[in-house]
Amino acid sequence: MAKQVRTGVDGGAQSPRRRWGKQQIVLLSLCALVVLAVVCGVLDYHSLLPKRSYTAVDFGVETLRSETDRNGNGVDDFTDILEGARKAVEENPVYDNSYAAGGYPEAGRGACTDVIWRALAHAGYDLKGMVDTDIALEPAAYPGAEDPNIDFRRVKNLEVFFSRHCAVLTLDPYQVADWQPGDIVTFSPSHIAIVSDKRNRDGVPYIIHQDGQPQKEEDALTHRTVTGHYRFIV
């Protein structure tokens, strides 16, 4: 008996239809889940997914207040530093670590270190002047110092300054009671941030920083190796 061949509209042979089997469906579903997991992971890393934040009260942690109010505005220094950091990033400044004549980059631009001096300026402190003075007094302590227009914008110099003049604290992000709003934290590779009053579900605080990322206040303290943790008590 002759074997029947299905023909197409033009009379040519028509290929048999391929049916999706269970294995193909399972494989396709797994691939879709992997892609979804990767996308969600990237979005979560950059703090672009909705996430509940907590405060120190949720973990029975007392929020410390500075005994100093440098600018005399009725707000303690630690709170002023925190508010200054938020103010420094509230309009999503453009990341720019280039050299600035006179030392200060223009408004709306800056790198991670620019969040720090702006936060301290909000509290009434001239970080550039303080760093320049300390370098002049102890130049050997600052092997990375080169130019007053950039020295206060380099993490390695700020680590030296804060180590010499501020309270030096734990490097362990999970010692949650030892992390307070307005603290300063440095990382490897070269990066610096201000500690937020927001916390994640484990009590680890958020940080306020500038690295060109979409969210400037985010759950990112554990994304890098912490190299320094300071409280501005001078």
Image: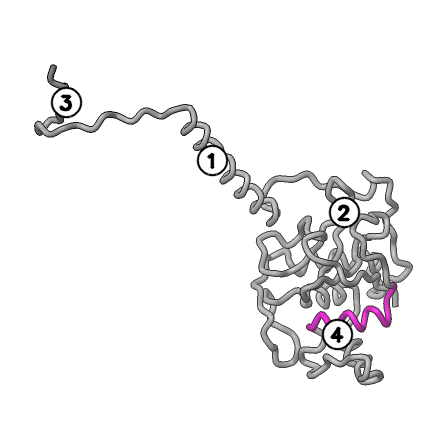
Give the mark nearer the N terminus: 3 vs 4. Answer: 3
Dot label at residue 32: 1
- Name the residue rendered at 67%, 61% in the picture: 88
Q: Height in image: 204 above or below 90?
A: above
- Name the residue rendered at 71%, 52% in the picture: 222
Q: Height in image: 106 above or below 197?
A: below
- Residue 27, position in %: x, y? 45, 32
Q: CA distance from mark 2 to mark 4?
A: 27 Å
Give the labeled residue for mark 4: 157
Give the labeled residue for mark 2: 204
Tell me the SS state at disc 3: loop
Give the labeled residue for mark 3: 5
Tell me the SS state at disc 1: helix
Callout 3 touching callout 1 (CB < 8 Å): no
**Residue furthest out toward the front:** 1
- Residue 212, position in %: x, y? 58, 60
Residue 158 is inside the magenta segment: yes
Using the rendered view, name the quadrant where residue 171 is placed: bottom right
The label nearer to you, 3 versus 4, is 3
Q: CA distance from mark 3 to mark 4?
A: 81 Å
Using the rendered view, name the quadrant where residue 2 is placed: top left
Give the mark nearer the N terminus: 3 vs 1. Answer: 3
Indicate the quadrant containing the N terminus: top left, top right, bottom left or bottom right: top left
The amino acid at mark 2 is Val
The amino acid at mark 4 is Asn
The label nearer to you, 3 versus 1, is 3
The label nearer to you, 3 versus 2, is 3
